[in-house]
Amino acid sequence: MLTKNICVFAYNKCSQKYLTKILCNRLYSESKSVKTPLYDLHVKNGGKMVDFAGFLLPVQYSDMTVSASHLFTRKSASIFDVSHMLQTNVNGKDSVEWFESICPVDLKGMANGSSSLTVFLNEKGGIIDDLIVTKVAEDRLYIVSNAGRLEVDKQHMLETSDIYSKKGKDVKVDFWDCSQRALIAVQGPNAASILQPLTEFSLEDLVFMTSKTGKVAGVDCRITRCGYTGEDGVEISIPADQANTVTEALLQSKDMKLAGLGARDSLRLEAGLCLYGNDINEDITPVEAALTWLVAKRRRTEQNFPGASIIVRQIKEGVQKRRVGIRLEGAPARRGAVLKDDKGTTIGNVTSGCPSPSLGGNVAMGYVLEHLKKPGTPLAVNIRGKDIPCVVSKMPFVPAKYYIKK
């Protein structure tokens, strides 16, 4: 999960190399940006630091292009510093009831130690943010949400939990600042094998979307089997003062490297994963975003979450637009590019797009009219005033490799 202050890639046909351009909606001076606990390690390793949602993070490293870092992650394993993301702990016997009042997830039906992708919703059924919630216990939750929505999410959780507290319910929301807690994503086919010798429990039992606490390199951490690349991997929550210890222990392997925001974005796009502020926002519902699966079956019946009547009606009756994948050759389609049908009529827009290091050519996501969502449908995308042929494609573009124990 990234934020809308995202790095965008341009492809230079003359040099045949990816060039990185940083476009930010808000301007920060370096002195006002927050340094994560791993800042010094990034600089020591040649990290090209940029402001990202108010945090100083590496977009790439001096020893590797964005494309090379992307491909290394798909082949082996990389570490991404995601300490900028908001980590939240919720305690109290009414925590599950409160959380289900703001999300369409079936927390009651989840086993302790399991995690789920879900969304905060407004009364229109629009997506306030996407996040991962872990049901640590019946009275305890652990939540990771987007840095770009940090203040919005804080306010939303505090206001809604305060309403519950005033009703005599037992809910307490606490936020970890990145000065207290770091978060790293270890992603790639070799992630588990490199991590295993550093842990005290078998990773074979930690399947996709499960979470537990344990030691990593002698440090007490929370390890969740998830990620934003489509690869197997984990996210590790670490006490801030021990973040370097854990990260450097993982880097002792020649098959593990540091990776930046650039590769993180192209990896998530190949995996067909949404970027908040681009592909989803407060005016887009889960159904329109092709995320209907986030609305649990029980919750559809109960309809006791924000925007439930609108979302359930959309599930039954359909929508006018839908998020789809797009493939094309030549220049990449960027956010905002106009999509047209075979008659030249405007039928939608691109929301994310970049060259695909894994597949060649370019991949993109966008919204099209409902009747044009079928994979294989020919369209055109307007790039620099010229209509370029493209085709609706099934997502993910690259097959997911999440670890499911058989």
Image (cartoon, helix red, strand yellow):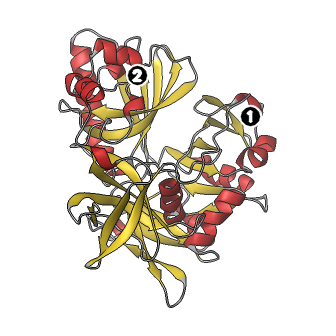
As drawn, which residue projects farthest toward the top? 168
Q: Nearer the viewer, mark 2 or mark 1?
A: 2
Q: In this figure, which residue is indicated by the disc labeled 2?
A: 296
Badge 2 amino acid: Ala
As drawn, which residue projects farthest toward the bottom? 14
**Relative to 251, is 406 above or below?**
above
As drawn, which residue projects farthest toward the left? 124
- Percent position of residue 6, x then y: 38, 62
Q: Does residue 79 appear to the left or right of 25 in the view shown?
A: right
**Relative to 205, is 8 above or below?**
below
**Relative to 297, is 398 above or below?**
below
- Percent position of residue 298, x then y: 39, 14
Q: In this figure, which residue is indicated by the disc labeled 1?
A: 203
Residue 392 visible in the displayed image: yes
Q: Residue at x 56, y 51 (%)?
A: 229
Q: Residue at x 58, y 43 (%)?
A: 235
Q: Which mark is residue 1?
A: none
Lower position in the chain sequence, tag 2 or tag 1? 1
As drawn, which residue projects farthest toward the front? 343
Badge 1 amino acid: Leu
Towards the viewer: 180 or 3? 3
| Callout 1 secondary element | helix
Q: Does residue 307 appear to the left or right of 251 in the view shown?
A: left
Mark 1 neighbour density, 10 Å: few (under 14) some (14–19) many (20 or more): some
Tally of numbered tags: 2
| Callout 2 secondary element | loop
- Percent position of residue 378, x then y: 38, 60
- Percent position of residue 244, x then y: 64, 54
Towards the viewer: 59 or 278? 278
